[in-house]
Image (cartoon, rainbow, N blue to C red):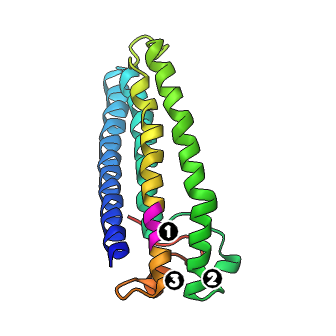
Amino acid sequence: MFLLRLQGFIDGFSDLLGRIAALLFILLLFNVFYDVAARYLFNSVNLGLQELEWHLYASMFMLGIPFALKSGSHVRVDVIYDRLSARGRAWIDLFGSLLLLLPFTLLIAWYGVDFVKDAYSIGEGSPDPGGLPHRWVIKSVIPFAMLFNFISGIGFMLAALNCLLGHSGADCADQASSTSTSTGTGGGI
């Protein structure tokens, strides 16, 4: 039961990150709309707002990955996966998480910290006049997002483990059906 509760807690955290990513998308939409309207209606260009577009996009993308993993809408190759039983899929999810996902996220987070520290120590900002200062702020999204992906990866691994252990309440069949379709991706936000 502890594993099911832990998985539920991590899934809730991934859902929260998905909501934050959705909010960032709305902010990005308004930012782009304002930027285009200001440029074409008033012949006004704001480089800071243009840079904010890619800051919002990068943050939205990086923070949306844990939700995509949790909801099964991440990219996967379904050539073999679709033909396996729910337990077979759970084994692939478990070992894929242990051997690929978790080490990759830790590696990127580890090197991302130095990336942020370097940007902070030199006071890196936009090279463009009127651009955004403090480039370390957007760069800090990388290690944080990878840490969040690591946590979500543990939840993904726990879902597979709960399925394999046959815990009542584990969505083994639901996980198998929601994580793949004919296009190779599952559901979405």
Q: Return the residue at label 3.
A: 164
The image shows residue 144, relative to residue 148, as above or below, that is above
Task: Name the amino acid type tagged 3.
Answer: Leu
Crowding at dot 1, Cα within 10 Å, few <14 / some 14-19 / many 20+, comes out as many
The answer to whether the residues at label 2 and label 1 have Cβ atoms under 8 Å apart is: no
Chain-order first, disc 3 or disc 2: 2
- Residue 102 lies in quadrant: bottom right
Q: Return the residue at label 2.
A: 82
Q: Nearer the viewer, residue 36 or 81?
A: 81
Q: Return the residue at label 1.
A: 157
Question: SS at mark 1?
Answer: helix
Residue 113 position in % (x across, y down): 49, 31
The answer to whether the residues at label 3 and label 2 have Cβ atoms under 8 Å apart is: no
Residue 96 position in % (x across, y down): 61, 66
Q: Residue at x 30, y 64 (%)?
A: 12
Res. 4 visible in picture = yes
Horizontal arrangement in the rendering, residue 160 relative to residue 60 (left or right) = right
Q: Which mark is residue 19?
A: none
The magenta stretch is 154-158
Horizontal arrangement in the rendering, residue 38 relative to residue 148 (left or right) = left
Residue 167 position in % (x across, y down): 40, 86
Q: Nearer the viewer, residue 116 or 177?
A: 116
Question: SS at mark 2?
Answer: loop
Crowding at dot 3, Cα within 10 Å, few <14 / some 14-19 / many 20+, comes out as some
Q: Residue at x 55, y 78 (%)?
A: 90
